[in-house]
């Protein structure tokens, strides 16, 4: 029997039909399984997770439709610690159910950096360097020096900080900057009766420094007013630029500053007429 005769036999035809039916059945089952497994034709909307913490995300009703994976954490002082700052896919995307959502969160513990060396940099260069390191510029204090506009000192929480010291990102750094004034001398301002902030501003405007501070009567620094200054005010008394003036404060709630200033009315009038030399 040759091949042509064989394929015409009932046995071959029966087996061929059975194999075709089985193949079609297997293909149907596989395609149905794939459709079920891949959720073909089904989609869900990705919720917005930015700003939420993992605990808050777990309480969302629709989050069971997704697999949430935290892949990274970064420092950001503007966002709550532990909250989501980036998500992929973005909110509003239509994806298949059980799609993975990759999250980047804000680190709970701020990243640490090494304090840069800002000495001798210009104020603009120092500010740019602080931003590069993720640090913030705090108060800038000008002091008399021939190095005009150059950084003379760097502080953290009022204490000098050395380059290379490990510090948290986002920390506020204060700077002392040189201000060339040619060795001039300036009239000491009349500070009696002024608040602490007013007195400090008056000293800055006169290129003088704040010296020792004493608070009598347990005075609150926010409301206390100047009761005494050293050196004392005197018309024509000139101090070297950067010279310190010490202040004593009292609580205005327990001390009659109106009567006190009347005793110094002449000095007050003279001070109002003064100009900076």
Image: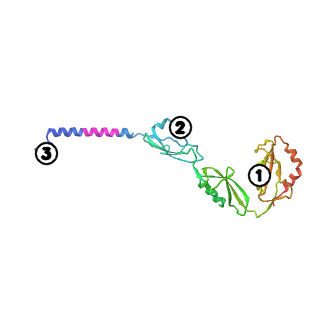
Does the magenta-highlighted stretch encompass residue 231?
no
Q: Position of residue 44 (x, y in %)?
A: 45, 39
Which dot, 3 or 2, sits closer to the camera? Answer: 2
Q: Quadrant of the C terminus?
A: bottom right
Label 2 vs label 1: CA separation? 48 Å
Residue 268: image x %, image y %? 86, 52
- What residue is pinned by disc 3? 4
Residue topped by disc 2: 55
As helix, strand or loop, the secondary structure at mark 2 comes to: helix
- Left or right of residue 103, residue 244 in this image: right
Q: Which residues are magenta?
A: 22-33
The residue located at (20%, 40%) in the rendering is 16
Mark 2 surroundings: few (<14), some (14-19) or many (≥20) residues within 10 A:
few
Q: Which residue is rendered at x = 87% and y = 52% of the image?
A: 267
Q: Secondary structure at mark 3?
A: helix
Element marked by disc 1: helix
According to the picture, the residue beneath numbered tag 1 turns out to be 200
């Amino acid at each position: 029997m040759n091949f042509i005769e064989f394929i015409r036999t009932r046995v071959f035809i029966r087996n061929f039909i059975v194999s075709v039916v089985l193949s079609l059945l297997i293909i149907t089952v596989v395609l149905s399984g794939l459709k079920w497994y891949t959720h073909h034709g089904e989609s869900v909307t990705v919720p917005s997770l930015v700003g939420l913490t993992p605990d808050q995300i777990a309480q969302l009703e629709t989050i069971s439709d997704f697999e949430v994976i935290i892949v990274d954490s970064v420092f950001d002082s503007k966002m709550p610690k532990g909250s989501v700052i980036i998500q992929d896919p973005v909110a509003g995307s239509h994806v298949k159910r059980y799609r993975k959502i990759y999250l980047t969160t804000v680190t709970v513990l701020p990243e640490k950096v090494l304090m840069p060396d800002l000495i001798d940099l210009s104020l603009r260069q120092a500010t740019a360097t602080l931003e590069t390191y993720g640090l913030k510029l705090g108060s800038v204090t000008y002091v008399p020096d021939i190095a005009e506009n150059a950084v003379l000192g760097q502080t953290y929480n009022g204490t000098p900080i050395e380059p290379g010291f490990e510090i948290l990102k986002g920390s506020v750094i204060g700077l002392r900057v040189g201000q060339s004034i040619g060795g001039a001398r300036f009239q000491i301002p009349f500070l009696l009766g002024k608040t602490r902030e007013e007195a400090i501003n008056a000293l800055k405007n006169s290129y003088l420094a704040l010296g020792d501070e004493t608070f009598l009567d347990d005075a609150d620094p926010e409301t206390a007013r100047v009761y005494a200054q050293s050196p004392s005010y005197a018309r024509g008394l000139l101090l070297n630029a950067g010279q310190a003036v010490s202040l004593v404060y009292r609580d205005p709630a327990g001390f009659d500053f109106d009567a006190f200033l009347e005793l110094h009315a002449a000095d007050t009038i003279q001070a109002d007429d003064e100009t900076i030399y």
